[in-house]
DNA sequence: GTTCGTGCAAATACTTTGCAAGTCG
DNA sequence: CGACTTGCAAAGTATTTGCACGAAC
């Protein structure tokens, strides 16, 4: 897995950015986590190795990594923005319950060849997709139905 | 179009929430805008009619409308979070350039029957989808290619 | 009349910035 | 060495909260 960190390091340099321990460490943490981490989590993990890496560096680095396409950012309802490496081939897309905020990953294959279609049709390059489906999970849905009945009963 | 505001008003009440002028006005503004508005824009428009509606009310109301599913929130890179009514049948999904932040709407039909698949497969109700595709637009892509050549030239 | 919602101001959280000192290439 | 990065502290934004008053049902 460190191969990808090194590849990323290379890419950073190619793009004319310097390779600093902080940047490399942040990439490492994200790669290792293999999932979404928020700013706070990233900072904590980085500081275990380099205790005085500052929050602003984490912000600045994530900004940089976002614009180079090395990391992606996602916003799930009820959650702080989170980050993961763009190369992670783990599941990215989520269903979130509007009410209890339960999160479920979704089957990537449902998207079909959307990715390729978009690249071709709109001439965008290095696309990464982020799909968030918000709705009521089954449990909350039942609860809501019941509450509605209750309030109707009360009003009669 | 006010039909939808009234329908929303009804729904709010059914769910046991009170119907206040502020809430109704915010729904009205969102319905009329027929597109994404951020908190600041919403507040300004609401205040044209009711000058002393407070920012906190706008925050609180949007929170409420989100959890009832009447409005959806989206986060585009480089933009403040924005809101629109969930019933708007306008285009929701976006391609964003990682570099210049240009935004392009995408053809909904590319998604196929994803919506239905998700509802069936995961038993979620009242789903709304929010897809963000981030990549480099053609213009920025060319620019980046050139920059890379330049830096390679320099290093030789 | 009660309960819920609002406005205001203050508190909190989040993110960005200026600048001197340090580091990468 | 020179340009780019960082850490720190401070500034700037954004969002949330407590509470007394007012409004909806």
Image (cartoon, coloured by chain):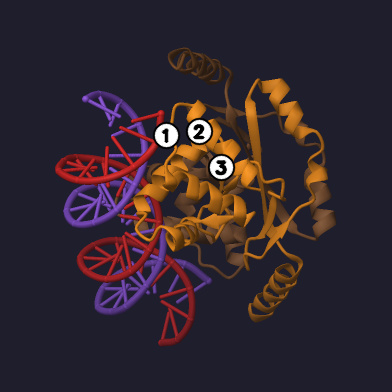
Chain colours: A brown, B orange, C purple, D red
Specify the label residue B12 is tagged with: 2
Q: What residue lies at 71% left-to-right and 53% top-to-bottom?
A: A127
Residue A63 point in image, percent of width and height: 50, 59
| Quarter assignment of residue A20 | bottom left
Nearest the eye: B29 or A92: B29
Dot 3 or dot 2: first in sequence order is 2
Residue B147 point in image, percent of width and height: 67, 75
Check whether the beta carbons of the residues at disc 2 and disc 1 lie within 8 A of each other: yes
Specify the label residue A103 is tagged with: none
Residue D10 point in image, percent of width and height: 22, 69
Nearest to the eye among marks 3 and 2: give it. 2
Nearest to the eye among marks 3 and 1: give it. 1
A98 above or below B26? above
Disc 3 versus disc 1: distance between alpha carbons? Answer: 17 Å
Q: What residue lies at 63% left-to-right and 68% top-to-bottom?
A: B100
Disc 3 versus disc 2: distance between alpha carbons? Answer: 12 Å
Q: Chain of mark 1?
A: B
Asked if marks 2 and 1 fall on the same chain, the answer is yes
| Quarter assignment of residue B120 | top right
Q: Secondary structure at mark 3?
A: strand
- Crowdedness near tag 2: few (<14), some (14–19) or many (≥20) residues, C-alpha within 10 Å: some
Q: What residue lies at 58% left-to-right and 61% top-to-bottom?
A: A67
A123 above or below A75? below
Q: Quadrant of the N terminus of chain A?
A: top right
B90 above or below B101? above
Disc 1: which residue: B18
Disc 3: which residue: B71
Dot 2 or dot 1: first in sequence order is 2
Disc 2 versus disc 1: distance between alpha carbons? Answer: 7 Å
Residue A34 in sight here: no
Left or right of residue B77: residue B21:
left
């Amino acid at each position: 897995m460190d191969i990808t960190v090194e590849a990323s390091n290379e890419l950073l340099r190619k793009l004319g950015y310097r390779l600093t321990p902080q940047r490399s460490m942040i990439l490492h943490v994200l790669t290792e986590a293999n999932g979404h981490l928020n700013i706070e989590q990233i900072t904590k993990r980085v500081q275990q190795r380099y205790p005085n890496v500052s929050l602003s560096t984490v912000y600045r680095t994530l900004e940089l990594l976002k614009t180079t396409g090395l990391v992606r950012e996602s916003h799930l309802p009820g959650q702080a923005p989170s980050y993961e490496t763009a190369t992670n081939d783990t599941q990215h897309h989520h269903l979130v319950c509007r009410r209890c905020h339960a999160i479920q990953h979704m089957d990537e294959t449902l998207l079909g060849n959307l990715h390729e279609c978009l690249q071709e049709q709109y001439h965008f390059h290095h696309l990464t997709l982020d799909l968030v489906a918000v709705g009521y999970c089954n449990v909350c849905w039942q609860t809501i139905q019941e509450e509605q009945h209750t309030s109707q009963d009360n009003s009669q």
